[in-house]
Image: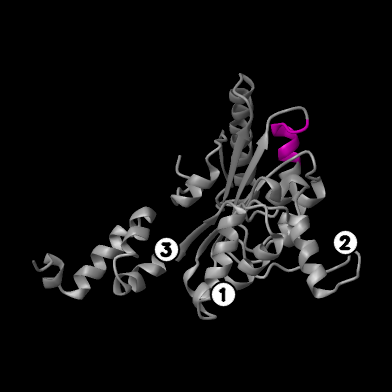
Amino acid sequence: MTSPFATLPPELLLLVFSLASRHRPTAVALSLVSHWVHNHIEPNLYHTVSLTSSRSLIAFVVALKSKPHAFAQNLVKRLSVTALGPISHIEDVLRMCTGVTSLVCGFSVPSYIHCTRDKKGLVAPLETATFRLPIAPHEQHLIALACRDGLDVSFISPLVTHLRIQLTPATTFDSVARLRELPYLTHLAIIYSHGLCLRAKSVKKMLEPVLEERKLRVLVIHVAGVGSEAHPEELEEWRALEAISCTTTHKRLGHDPPTRIIAKRATTAILPQWEQGTDIWDASP
């Protein structure tokens, strides 16, 4: 019996496969149908990549090394690396996927920088050595281990426009102030746990140098922690600060729009939100 697909024009089949492959499990299943289908589905499989374990990281590096040199650069556009290592494989991935526009980092940044310095044979002290990320995404998320030891601004893309970072007790005022050095930063998201070290007023104090640059259009505040009455109070304090900021900014900047502050409780679903393409930057009231 002849397959009904055999009578359809190739252009229509490609459209069907393209729409179906937006669902990753479906895309994987379709890629096994035939070589012809696999060749057309493969770009969708590599568009968004999430590496959550050492096994998936190593397998991905092996797969990329079997492809043409420009394969990863042309196809991988959204990349998340939350695997702890091997760090050398993380470096391989970042060096091969230079076309990435959105990057999630959940691994140890100091370990990564030390690894790259050792490969280059650098002997200068870490604080005096120059480090540059091998890719330049416009959107970057530093979460979990990437922020555990504080914020290293040298690890942030110089072309970043949308940045999400996590504040920890190791985060210094000076490191946050250095965010003002990012020339294209317009959207900033901050995650922090409400507690003795970090409260709305202290976080705002950290952000003052960045806000004074008058480049931020959207500031998203995610307050994390165990549910309690402190959360509503903390969020209300941010909303009060937003009202003050709007009034002050209008007086100072005339018709220039103020920074829009969006304050909400943090969820544990950062990675699923990113994978689904959820817009955390929506500044609509």
Q: Is residue 9 above or below residue 253?
A: below
Rendering coords of residue 54 (x, y %): 62, 55
Would you say residue 198 sits in the magenta stretch?
A: yes
Mark 1–mark 3 contact, CB under 8 Å?
no
Which comes sooner in the sequence, label 1 or label 3?
3
Please name the residue shown 58% across and 67% down the image. 61
Instruction: Give the side of residue 244 with respect to residue 38, left or right.
Output: right
Would residue 79 be visible to someone looking at this image?
A: yes
Question: What whole-number distance in Å separates the C-alpha atoms at marks 1 and 2?
Answer: 33 Å
Q: Is residue 195 above or below residue 156?
A: above
Rendering coords of residue 130 (x, y %): 81, 69
Q: Secondary structure at mark 2?
A: loop
Q: Quadrant of the N terminus?
A: bottom left
Residue on which disc 1 sits: 65
Q: Secondary structure at mark 3?
A: helix
Instruction: Give the side of residue 10 with respect to residue 257, left or right.
Output: left
Residue on which disc 2 sits: 127
Which comes sooner in the sequence, label 3 or label 2?
3
Residue on which disc 3 sits: 45
Is the residue marked by circle 2 packed among few (<14), some (14-19), or many (20+) residues within 10 Å?
few
Which comes sooner in the sequence, label 1 or label 2?
1
